[in-house]
Image (cartoon, rainbow, N blue to C red):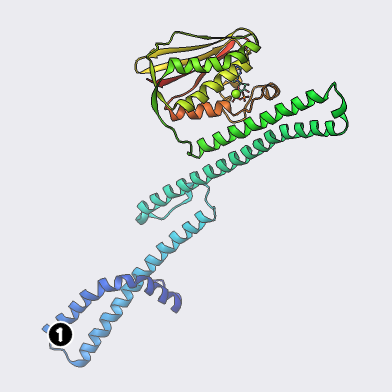
Amino acid sequence: MAIDLKTSSDFKENFSFGKIYFKKLIFPLIFVFLFHILFYDLSLATLFFVIVVLISFAVIIVTYLGSIRRKEINQIKDIIFKIRENKFNSPDEISLGKHLVELEGEIKSMFLRTQNDIQNLKKLEQVRTEFLGNVSHELRTPIFAIQGFIETLLNGAIDDKRVNRSFLEKAGIHTENLNNLLNDLIDISMIESGQMKMSFRYFGIAEFITGIIDEFTPLADEKGLEIRCGYIKPTLKIFGDRNRLKQVFVNLLQNAIKYTDTGYIEIICNEEGKLCNISIKDTGIGIPEVDLERIFERFYRVDKARSRAVGGTGLGLAIVKHILEAHSSKIEVKSEVNKGTEFSFKLKK
Ligand SMILES: Nc1ncnc2c1ncn2[C@@H]1O[C@H](COP(=O)(O)OP(=O)(O)O)[C@@H](O)[C@H]1O
Ligand SMILES: [Mg+2]
């Protein structure tokens, strides 16, 4: 029996680690002791000797088991400490020996999970920082512009009839952009924090789309664009949140008008089994293929200057994507530069 008894404190430690086995040992020993009393006619001296032998035996066994337990627990402690201090690069560096294979497996999977969580947190932190940076930048642009116009007016332009009105109008446009940005930011944060309540109901899609087209016709007329709509059965009903879906249509129509210089915009609504496929098509500037998968990211614009000039916030499509996801739907886009763009999605009917 190789017992690690380098010092008396080592011995004490090993013994205290093995104490847990003491209870298990004491009963067999009491049994052996009683057996001796019952079957041998022992003298007091022999009895004392038997007691001393049994106790020594118990202490040696307990210390031996304690030393094994102590080694294992120290090994586990060491691994936990190293995980906490980030000293492992891969789970293969964690090893506990043959007897603790299962525990080793558990610790390895815990380590992997923690590593994953840490990576996700780092990513989230990066996204948050990026988002804050973007927000500040987006806020600064209209605020600086408004400040500039006000300063110029105060410095004398207010009395210059050729520019005073147009400077005020421009400041007004930037104020509107600022307001749009704040509204979109509120929407995005509500959606992403899960606070946006959805209320799903059946509603008539034909009358819904006609209403939206009526609202946008003046804007399209200004640019000489026509808004067309394919035939929709008057009784066709869609299941969804009417107000949120209106936001989807408004965003897509606004984009279609903003990014189209000539031609038309078309809304098509086709029944496909239990679903209704809706598409909003334009004959506008189109989106280059490399940008197609990124346009749904917050603040991503193909042409920042153009988007800002037409009052875009860069958040519209991110909001559209979120709202449609809440309807278990997915937005698709097809586009060809200088030919046009088509956004489509399916809704339950
Ligand atoms: N119908 C479209 N035609 C061409 N480009 C579009 C269209 N819709 C969106 N885009 C591009 O996708 C970008 C992101 O759209 P969106 O999130 O609505 O932001 P924005 O506020 O700039 O309109 C736009 O800046 C524009 O570059
Ligand atoms: Mg938009």
Q: Quadrant of the C terminus?
A: top left
Quick one: SS at disc 1?
A: helix
Regarding residue 72, the answer to whether it shows in the image is: yes
Q: Residue 341 or 40: which is nearer the viewer?
A: 341
Q: Residue 110 or 78: which is nearer the viewer?
A: 110
Asked whether mark 1 and ligand 1 are closer than 8 Å, the reply comes as no
Q: Position of residue 267 (x, y in %)?
A: 50, 12
Q: Quadrant of residue 339?
A: top right
Q: Quadrant of residue 297?
A: top right
- Label 1 belongs to which residue? 37
Q: Residue at x 52, y 46 (%)?
A: 118
Q: Is residue 184 above or below residue 293?
A: below
Q: Viewed as shown, does residue 81 lie left or right of 11?
A: right
Q: Position of residue 310 (x, y in %)?
A: 67, 21
Q: How many marks?
A: 1
Q: Is residue 187 above or below residue 301?
A: below
Q: Residue at x 40, y 17 (%)?
A: 276
Regarding residue 5, the answer to whether it shows in the image is: no
Q: Is residue 279 above or below residue 315?
A: above
Q: Residue 159 or 50: which is nearer the viewer?
A: 159
Q: Is residue 184 above or below residue 61?
A: above
Q: Position of residue 237 (x, y in %)?
A: 38, 18
Amino acid at the residue labelled 1 = Ile
Q: Quadrant of the N terminus?
A: bottom left
Q: Position of residue 81 (x, y in %)?
A: 50, 59
Q: Viewed as shown, does residue 135 lie left or right of 232?
A: right
